[in-house]
Image: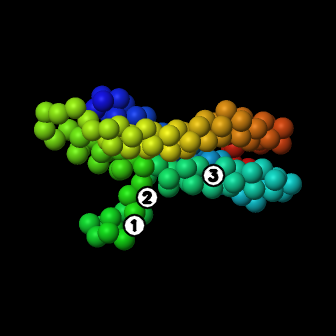
């Protein structure tokens, strides 16, 4: 039980890292488009992808925690809830209760919804964005003019 919980938590946290890398790449690409004409649709699409990625990230991980008091002000998210479950279940030398198993199932379902949404973006929207960049003939590396 704890190993499967750990694996789901690792998958969740790795997805948050992946989201952050993708958002960073998109931000760099969108900066390259600044000042270019006739590519507003590409910029708009790129910003909508970043927005959707941020929504997923915010469901999986509490991004607003900066100080020790912030967990009191902002609710914990799915990764923290799953981690807390693991912490409570690992106390003692007993099998998980039926309630703990049900909570894990519920949290796993909620996490999978977000991970599936992330996969949809990666498989469909990002290739479409890259195709738009390619068709617009925007160079990957620009040498100063």
Left or right? Give the position of 12 relative to 131. Answer: left
User: In which image quadrant can residue 122 be found?
Assistant: top right
Horizontal side of 127 relative to 56 (left or right) equals: right
Q: Describe residue 39's horizontal placement relative to residue 122 as left or right.
A: right
Give the secondary structure at mark 3.
helix
Residue that numbered label 3 is attached to: 52
Looking at the image, the residue that sits furthest to the front is: 98
| 60 and 40: which is toward the camera | 60
* Residue 73 x/y as whole percent: 36, 71
Spatial separation of the CA atoms under disc 1 and disc 3: 20 Å
Q: Are marks 3 and 2 in contact (CB under 8 Å)?
A: no
Q: Quickly name the residue at label 1.
A: 74
Tell me which residue sits at (62%, 47%) in the image: 26
| x, y percent for residue 116 | 59, 37
Question: In this orientation, which residue lies closer to the viewer: 113 or 64?
Answer: 113
Q: Earlier in the sequence, mark 1 or mark 2?
A: 2
Going 23% across and 45% down the picture, which residue do you hit? Answer: 88
Residue drawn at 50 percent across, 55 percent down: 58
User: Residue under circle 2?
Assistant: 63
- CA distance separating discs 3 and 2: 15 Å
Q: Position of residue 69 (x, y in %)?
A: 28, 70
Considering depth in this image, is 101 or 2 the residue closer to the camera? 101
Give residue 45's position: percent from left, percent from top: 74, 51
Residue 136 in view in this figure? yes
């Amino acid at each position: 039980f704890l190993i499967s919980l750990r694996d789901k938590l690792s998958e969740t946290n790795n997805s948050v890292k992946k989201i952050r890398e993708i958002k960073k790449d998109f931000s760099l690409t969108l900066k390259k488009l600044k000042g270019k004409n006739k590519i507003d649709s590409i910029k708009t699409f790129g910003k909508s992808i970043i927005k959707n990625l941020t929504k997923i990230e915010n469901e999986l991980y509490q991004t607003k925690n900066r100080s020790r008091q912030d967990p009191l002000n902002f609710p914990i998210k799915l990764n923290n809830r799953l981690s807390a479950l693991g912490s409570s279940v690992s106390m003692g030398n007993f099998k998980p209760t039926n309630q703990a198993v049900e909570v894990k199932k519920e949290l796993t379902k909620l996490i999978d919804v977000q991970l599936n949404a992330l996969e949809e973006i990666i498989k469909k929207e990002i290739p479409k964005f890259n195709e738009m960049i390619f068709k617009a003939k925007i160079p990957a590396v620009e040498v100063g003019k």
